[in-house]
Image (cartoon, coloured by chain):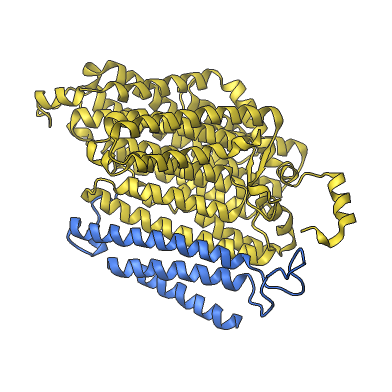
């Protein structure tokens, strides 16, 4: 499973970065989405893919018994997804507003503040 | 008493929520904003004294013992940063009373400022890698909205670059956290300091590069600084000032923390890269600034070169790969102390210059140097404050900048890194050139023949100027005091640097060696979690 996911993550990163290097605002935002999803999948894979028991505490025990899976990566990813969702929502609103104000979606036209 | 560690995070959160309830009451929001910042500043000083007297303080959230729960750790560096950050928050809150227009206030300027402070203080205090990421995002989100609030064209263009580059760096940080967790099984920084030693050196170096780039973007390290000069001059001056005070400092703080606590296995490579980036950053930033002709653009580019100075102290860590003698360690400690002094100095001086630029832009109607002039005659007090701040930035004795650079340059000479010392001195000279350029054009030159604002507009702009002048005077006074109290400040910075040099202090504070507890755990066997 790991090699498959590794290839998926790699392609996501490649696609995301490729899109970000285009001049179009919409492609830029799609690139950002791909990048953050790739990072989430990377946590998932790097923390180890195991087919083990769910980390549940059986009745009468103080801690999970036997060989159980690590629940922390999922918690991390969940947090990261929520944060990513908020950030991407803001980015979309920003890009939409920028398109209205500047009147173009070509990044090469946005050089007024560059130095 | 350690509960005070959450104050700098909890207070702004509560106040921001209250402000949302009082959404339409501008006056109440303003008062709440000032009260919260004042409370944080007082809390920060209490924390600083506490840490100074009792050593590193640790707070475990919800009573979950480290490394299972989230830990807040305040060593001297964190306490210094929190205090300075809240103080700047207070100063900018006062300045905003006049500088921020009604429209921006109506769209939540005050709660956003609180959330920015919350993210920044949280990042300074947390002892957990993932928690650091979360606080980074809180800070970024608040800064995104503060940067774009107002919706002018320049703001939009600057924001696109700022948002994109920072999101890339966040994604890298997240990837680094994931891989780090996969390799060590922990995200608690103190625990990591122990466990990373199990990883092979080259692998760890590769991983550390992810963190270097992620934090480097936030700190505007060479060559990752391009978002900074593109965006800093676009929002209102109060926002620029708080950005200049806090945003890059969080990056620098994270670099300081991670590269003295966790990734210290190969200073010959990692810290050498930081040192080289610092050198190029200094020269690049100052040359970029010399080419600019707008008040705030010059100052923004200077930030890049100042970040170079801050990273120089951390980069000098690299000599530890050559010799680990007591003497060398002492000089490296002095270099780190220089970095800490420089961070605090820059945290005061740079925002003050931005605040001054705000007054100038308000009265002159523009930031372009060629359209300004005559401020020495019309605003003698402001001119004096500019001289103090700009000379401190350039490093003229006896002001704060001189001592910060003196400590750094002396350490680099002591460690026989001649090139970086030369770069630092050369940069200081060019900084002086830029500052004199602003002085000559804005303050000394005769008033422009065709002022952009007529008499009436000028009078209107002058109304209610006191809240803008007061913070500038306070900060300028602070710069002078800083310069004359350099001795005690150096001693405190040395203490903070000593804690950075000896990670075992940090680790022992988080995992206290309690013999009774270990004995109990051994007796209880595996029933205890």
Residue at image position (63%, 60%) is: B205
Residue at image position (53%, 17%) is: B484
Q: Left of B359 or right of it: where is A63?
A: right
In this view, B189 is above or below B96: below
In this view, B146 is above or below B467: below
In this view, B2 is above or below B132: above
Q: Colour of chain B?
A: yellow
Q: Colour of chain A?
A: blue
The quarter of the picture where residue B302 lies is: top left
| Residue B246 on image: x %, y % | 45, 40
| Residue B495 on image: x %, y % | 67, 31
Q: Quadrant of the N terminus of chain B?
A: top right
Q: Quadrant of the C terminus of chain B?
A: bottom right
| Residue B230 on image: x %, y % | 32, 49
Residue at image position (39%, 32%) is: B32
Residue at image position (50%, 56%) is: B214
Q: Is residue B222 visible?
A: no
Q: Is residue A33 visible?
A: yes
| Residue B369 on image: x %, y % | 23, 33
In this view, A81 is above or below B519: below
Q: How many marks?
A: 0
Of residue B3 and residue B279, the one placed in the foreground of this image is B3
């Amino acid at each position: 499973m790991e090699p498959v996911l590794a290839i998926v993550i790699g392609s996501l990163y490649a696609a995301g970065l490729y899109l970000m290097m285009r001049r179009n605002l919409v492609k830029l935002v799609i690139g950002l989405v791909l990048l953050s999803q790739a990072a989430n999948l990377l946590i998932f894979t790097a923390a180890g893919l195991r087919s083990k028991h769910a980390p549940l505490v059986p009745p009468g025990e103080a801690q999970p018994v036997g060989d159980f899976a690590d629940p922390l990566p999922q918690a991390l990813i969940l947090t990261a997804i929520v944060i990513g969702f908020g950030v991407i929502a803001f980015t979309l609103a920003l890009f939409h507003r920028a398109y209205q104000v500047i009147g173009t979606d070509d990044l090469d036209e946005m050089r007024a503040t560059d130095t | 008493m350690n509960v005070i560690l959450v104050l700098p995070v909890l207070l702004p959160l509560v106040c921001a929520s209250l402000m949302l309830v009082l959404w339409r009451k501008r006056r109440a929001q303003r008062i709440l904003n000032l009260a919260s910042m004042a409370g944080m500043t007082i809390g920060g000083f209490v924390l600083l004294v506490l840490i100074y007297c009792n050593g590193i303080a640790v707070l475990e959230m919800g009573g979950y013992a480290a490394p299972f729960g989230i830990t807040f750790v305040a060593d001297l560096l964190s306490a210094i940063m929190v205090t300075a950050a809240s103080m700047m928050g207070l100063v900018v809150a006062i300045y905003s009373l006049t500088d921020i227009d009604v429209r921006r206030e109506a769209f939540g300027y005050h709660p956003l400022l609180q959330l920015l402070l919350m993210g920044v203080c949280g990042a300074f205090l947390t002892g957990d890698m993932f928690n650091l990421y979360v606080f980074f995002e809180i800070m970024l989100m608040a800064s995104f909205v503060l940067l774009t609030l107002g919706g002018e064209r320049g703001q939009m263009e600057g924001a696109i670059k700022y948002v994109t580059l920072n999101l890339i760096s966040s994604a890298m940080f997240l990837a680094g956290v994931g891989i780090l967790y996969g390799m060590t099984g922990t995200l608690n920084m103190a625990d990591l300091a122990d466990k990373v030693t199990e990883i092979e050196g080259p692998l760890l170096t590769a991983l550390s590069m992810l963190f270097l780039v992620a934090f480097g973007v936030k700190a505007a390290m060479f060559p990752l600084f391009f978002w900074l000069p593109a965006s800093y001059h676009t929002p209102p001056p109060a926002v620029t000032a708080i950005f200049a005070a806090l945003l890059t400092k969080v990056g620098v703080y994270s670099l300081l923390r991670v590269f003295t606590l966790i990734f210290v296995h190969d200073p010959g490579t990692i810290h050498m890269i930081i040192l080289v980036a610092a050198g190029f950053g200094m020269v690049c930033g100052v040359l970029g600034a010399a080419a600019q002709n707008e008040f705030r653009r010059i100052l923004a580019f200077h930030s890049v070169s100042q970040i170079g100075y801050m990273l120089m102290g951390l980069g000098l860590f690299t000599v530890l790969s050559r010799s680990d003698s007591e003497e060398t360690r002492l000089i490296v400690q002095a270099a780190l102390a220089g970095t800490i002094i420089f961070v605090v100095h820059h945290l005061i001086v740079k925002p003050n210059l931005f605040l001054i630029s705000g007054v100038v832009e308000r009265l002159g109607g523009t930031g372009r140097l060629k359209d300004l002039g005559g401020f020495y005659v019309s605003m003698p007090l402001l001119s004096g404050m500019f001289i103090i701040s700009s000379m401190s930035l350039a490093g003229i004795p006896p002001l704060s900048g001189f001592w910060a650079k003196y400590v750094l340059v002396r350490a680099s000479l002591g460690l026989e890194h001649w090139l970086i010392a030369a770069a630092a001195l050369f940069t200081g000279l060019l900084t002086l050139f830029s500052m004199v350029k602003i002085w000559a054009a804005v303050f000394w030159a005769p008033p422009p023949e065709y002022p952009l604002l007529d008499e009436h507009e000028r009078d209107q702009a002058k109304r209610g100027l006191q809240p803008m002048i007061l913070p500038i005077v306070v900060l300028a006074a602070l710069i002078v005091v800083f310069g004359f109290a350099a001795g005690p400040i150096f001693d405190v910075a040395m203490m903070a640097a000593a804690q950075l040099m000896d990670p075992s202090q940090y680790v022992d504070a988080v995992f206290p060696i309690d013999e009774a507890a270990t004995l109990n755990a051994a007796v209880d066997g595996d029933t205890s979690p």
